[in-house]
Each structure stands twice: as structure tokens, then as C-alpha cells.
Image (cartoon, helix red, strand yellow):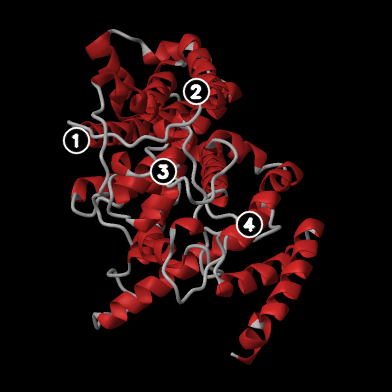
């Protein structure tokens, strides 16, 4: 493991360099404004902005430098502001669907907005239909998903700041992610790149198969974490002390509240939004450790995560592309993460790779050669055996052929016999 503060000389960041990191904040702000105002101008601007991010990601390229930041607290305030936007977007979704359900003004929000700004929300939503309802659902789903897998991910690691941890869990709760703030730091960070990890996709495993396989596993892992924690404390597992059960209780309260406030249509769209958020989350974690293997008895190293140094990726996700360094030192602030180019690298930014992951053939065309390279360049003797077995199970012809070569090499080196005896 590295030291918390890397021993390297860094250039000083200038003030303009802070601005690209407001990208998430712009997304949550635009989502808030759009869900309340129904503005076509804001709506098309929001769409164009998201498209621009995908176009700019390969154009703006990569950033291999790590800078010294004079005012890092700015980043924390940005994340907290994003959280506020996520909360308001969810409230906006509830208002839109409640208005659709009974024509009312939930919590007199429209009256308050008009009193303060003069804007007539009721008039703006007078002609709402399915398009507006679906847009409101997607906005809360997108902001909550990004708020869990990127912004919330960073906030849940700030265990010294109760407000940050609370905001992380709050954002996740809107889309039934209450388990994440437990599973991620106390599960994934200990088991990454092993079969015990619900965030590590297997070789040859498509994204939908991964999502289906690991959905139940997420909850099983958290239950085991809580069972062990509470038994060690001498407390009953089936009690309010169990964070998973508390999360279930809050999520049930949200479901009941959404149903009561917005009716059947609102509840149905809410459930669709939750599913969409979970699919987005799984697409994000799918690419971070895909196909990598690790001896469970050995600590996680740089080689056990796919790195990504694309600028747009790290602006949008608060440095999560430098994932290997984050696993090496989870306490390190995202703005201090080191790229570690000596480790395995994704061939594109997160937006490109998440898009590729939805097409199994294109994804494997991009990643299979990199897995073979990983086996030859990074794998320890124990991991070579694990990789060979993973290749044999993958069902992919290229990996199966590579496994035959690996088996021959391991037999010649005497490693296969040793492993079988052990």
C-alpha cells in the first residue's frame, strides 16, 4: 500500500482548472431547473450538454498529471451542492407526478416558487403528458445514479464528515441503494477482483448476466457484513442496529410515500427509474475490474483495477477513473489520486466503455486482447493459474485458446502440479 500522501513533486493548479469539475453540479442544477420549469430550452440544452460530453471525451484526451490544489475544500462543496440538486430533482419528480395524479400543488411548492420568483409552475405543467412524466423520471434516475456511483461514492469514503456520509446515503436511498454505503467500503474494497466481489465481472460475462448474477449478491454481502459486525458487538442481527434492515425500512417508507402521493402511474415510473439507476450503476462497476483476478490471500494492487485517465471521465465522476490508486489508498482524496500508467488501462473513457459494454461483441473485441496482455504482463504465479481457469470458463474462443497455452506453460514450469497438490 502507498502512503496517504504520494511522495511526488506536483505542479500548482490554477483557478481555471477547478471549473471543469463543476460538470456534475451543472447536471444536477440543470435537472432541478428542468423538472420544475418544464423549459424546452433547458431540456434541449441538457440533452446537448450530455451529447457534448461524449463527443468531447476522446477529443480532450487524457490527463496524466497530478496537481497541488490550494483550495481543495471547493471540491467538497461542489459534491454537497450536487447532493442538493439530486434531492430537489427527486422532489420535483414527486411534484410532477402528484400534480398528474390529483391536480394539486404538493407541499404548496408551486405557490412558494411563484411568490419568490414570479414563475407560474402550475401553468408550466398544465399540459403535462407522458413525455413530461418520463423526462421527470429520467432526471431523478440519472442524478441519483450518478450521485451514488460517482459523487456518493466519494462522499461515503469521507467517514470523518458525518454530513458527507449522510448525503451519500440520502442520494442512494432515492433509488433503493441504501446497501451501497455499507457494501462498497466494507465489502468491495476487501474483495475486489475475486469471485466474492459483486462488483467484479467475470471473463466472458456480458453486462446483463453480470447484473443478474450480482444483484442478489450485493445484499448477501451486506447481510454478512452486518451479521459479523453485530455478533462481534454482542447485538442481535434482527434489530434496528442492522444497517441493511434500516435501509429496507427507509426504502419501504419511500415506496409507500411515492404510492400515496403520486398514485399508480407515479409509482410505476418511480420503479422504472430505480431499475434504470441500478442498470447505470452496474454499467459503471462492470468496466472497473472486468475479468481481473486476484489471489484472495494477497492484498489488492494497482494491477487489479482498470485505470482511466481521460479528462472528461474524471471531471464527471470526481476522479473515479484513477480507480487503481483509489483502491490502493481509499483514504486519498479524489483530487490527489495518481494515474498509475504502469497498471492496466481501459482503451477509452468511461462514457465510451459503458456504451461498449452494452454490446458484448464490441466489448470483448476491445477487452479480450487486454486481458491476455494482463495475464502475460501482470499476473503473479498464483494469478496465472486463476486466469487460466477463468479463461477456460469464459466461453470465448480466444480466451480458451490462450488458456491452452497457459496450461502448457504452467505444466512446464511445474506450477500446475504444485497448485493441484495444494
Residue 14 horizontal/vertical position (percent) = 25, 22
Q: Residue at x 28, y 17 (%)?
A: 113
Q: Which of 389 and 352 is in front in this view?
A: 389
Q: Which residue is drawn at 41% across and 55% down?
A: 180
- The quarter of the picture where the N terminus appears is bottom left
Question: Is 161 situated left or right of 390 in this image?
Answer: left
| Mark in front: 2 vs 4 | 2
- Furthest residue toward bottom: 421
Per the model, the C-alpha gap separating discs 2 and 4 is 31 Å
Seen in the picture, residue 63 relative to 399 is either above or below; the reply is above
Per the model, the C-alpha gap separating discs 1 and 4 is 37 Å
Q: How many other residues sit within 10 Å of disc 1, few (<14), some (14-19) or many (≥20)? A: few
Residue 2 horizontal/vertical position (percent) = 31, 58
Residue 33 horizontal/vertical position (percent) = 38, 19
Per the model, the C-alpha gap separating discs 1 and 2 is 26 Å
Per the model, the C-alpha gap separating discs 3 and 2 is 17 Å
Secondary structure, mark 2, is helix
Secondary structure, mark 3, is loop
The residue tagged 4 is: 210
| Mark in front: 1 vs 4 | 1
The label on residue 73 is 1
Q: Determine if residue 257 is in view.
A: no
Residue 348 horizontal/vertical position (percent) = 58, 36
Q: How many other residues sit within 10 Å of disc 2, few (<14), some (14-19) or many (≥20)? A: few
Secondary structure, mark 1, is helix
Q: How many other residues sit within 10 Å of disc 4, few (<14), some (14-19) or many (≥20)? A: some
Q: Which of marks 3 and 4 is nearer the N terminus?
A: 4
The residue tagged 2 is: 60
Q: Earlier in the sequence, mark 1 or mark 4?
A: 1
Seen in the picture, residue 12 relative to 155 is either above or below; the reply is above
The residue tagged 3 is: 339
CB within 8 Å, label 2 to label 4? no
Amino acid at each position: 500500500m502507498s502512503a496517504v500522501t504520494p511522495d511526488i513533486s506536483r505542479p500548482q493548479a490554477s483557478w481555471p482548472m477547478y471549473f471543469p469539475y463543476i460538470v456534475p453540479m451543472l447536471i444536477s442544477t440543470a435537472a432541478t431547473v428542468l423538472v420544475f420549469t418544464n423549459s424546452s430550452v433547458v431540456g434541449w440544452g441538457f440533452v446537448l450538454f450530455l451529447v457534448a460530453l461524449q463527443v468531447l471525451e476522446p477529443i480532450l484526451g487524457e490527463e496524466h498529471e497530478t496537481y497541488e490544489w490550494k483550495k481543495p475544500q471547493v471540491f467538497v462543496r461542489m459534491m454537497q451542492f450536487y447532493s442538493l440538486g439530486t434531492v430537489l430533482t427527486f422532489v420535483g419528480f414527486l411534484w410532477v407526478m402528484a400534480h398528474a395524479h390529483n391536480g394539486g400543488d404538493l407541499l404548496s411548492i408551486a405557490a412558494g416558487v411563484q411568490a419568490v420568483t414570479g414563475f407560474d409552475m402550475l401553468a408550466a405543467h398544465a399540459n403535462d403528458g407522458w413525455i413530461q412524466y418520463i423526462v421527470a423520471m429520467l432526471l431523478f434516475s440519472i442524478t441519483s445514479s450518478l450521485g451514488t456511483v460517482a459523487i456518493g461514492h466519494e462522499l461515503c469514503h469521507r467517514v470523518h464528515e458525518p454530513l458527507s456520509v449522510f448525503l451519500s446515503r440520502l442520494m442512494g436511498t432515492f433509488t433503493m441503494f441504501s446497501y451501497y454505503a455499507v457494501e462498497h467500503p466494507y465489502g468491495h474494497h476487501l474483495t475486489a477482483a475475486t469471485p466474492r466481489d459483486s462488483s467484479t465481472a467475470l471473463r466472458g460475462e456480458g453486462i446483463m448476466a453480470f447484473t443478474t448474477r450480482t444483484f442478489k449478491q450485493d445484499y448477501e454481502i451486506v447481510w454478512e457484513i452486518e451479521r459479523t459486525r453485530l455478533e462481534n458487538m454482542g447485538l442481535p442481527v434482527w434489530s434496528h442496529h442492522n444497517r441493511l434492515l434500516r435501509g429496507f425500512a427507509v426504502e419501504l417508507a419511500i415506496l409507500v410515500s411515492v404510492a400515496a402521493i403520486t398514485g399508480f402511474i407515479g409509482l410505476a415510473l418511480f420503479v422504472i427509474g430505480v431499475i434504470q439507476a441500478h442498470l447505470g450503476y452496474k454499467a459503471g462497476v462492470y468496466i472497473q475490474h472486468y475479468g481481473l483476478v486476484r489471489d484472495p490471500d494477497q492484498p489488492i494492487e494497482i494491477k487489479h483495477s482498470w485505470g482511466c485517465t481521460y479528462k472528461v471521465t474524471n471531471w464527471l465522476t470526481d476522479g473515479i477513473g484513477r480507480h487503481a490508486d483509489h483502491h490502493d489508498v481509499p483514504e486519498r482524496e479524489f483530487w490527489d489520486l495518481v494515474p498509475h500508467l504502469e497498471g492496466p488501462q481501459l482503451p477509452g473513457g468511461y462514457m465510451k466503455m459503458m456504451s461498449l459494454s452494452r454490446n458484448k461483441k464490441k466489448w470483448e473485441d476491445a477487452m479480450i486482447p487486454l486481458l491476455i496482455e494482463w495475464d502475460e504482463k501482470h499476473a503473479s504465479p498464483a494469478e496465472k493459474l486463476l486466469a487460466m481457469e477463468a479463461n477456460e470458463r469464459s466461453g470465448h474462443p480466444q480466451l480458451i485458446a490462450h488458456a491452452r497455452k497457459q496450461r502448457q506453460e504452467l505444466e512446464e514450469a511445474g506450477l500446475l502440479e504444485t497448485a493441484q497438490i495444494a
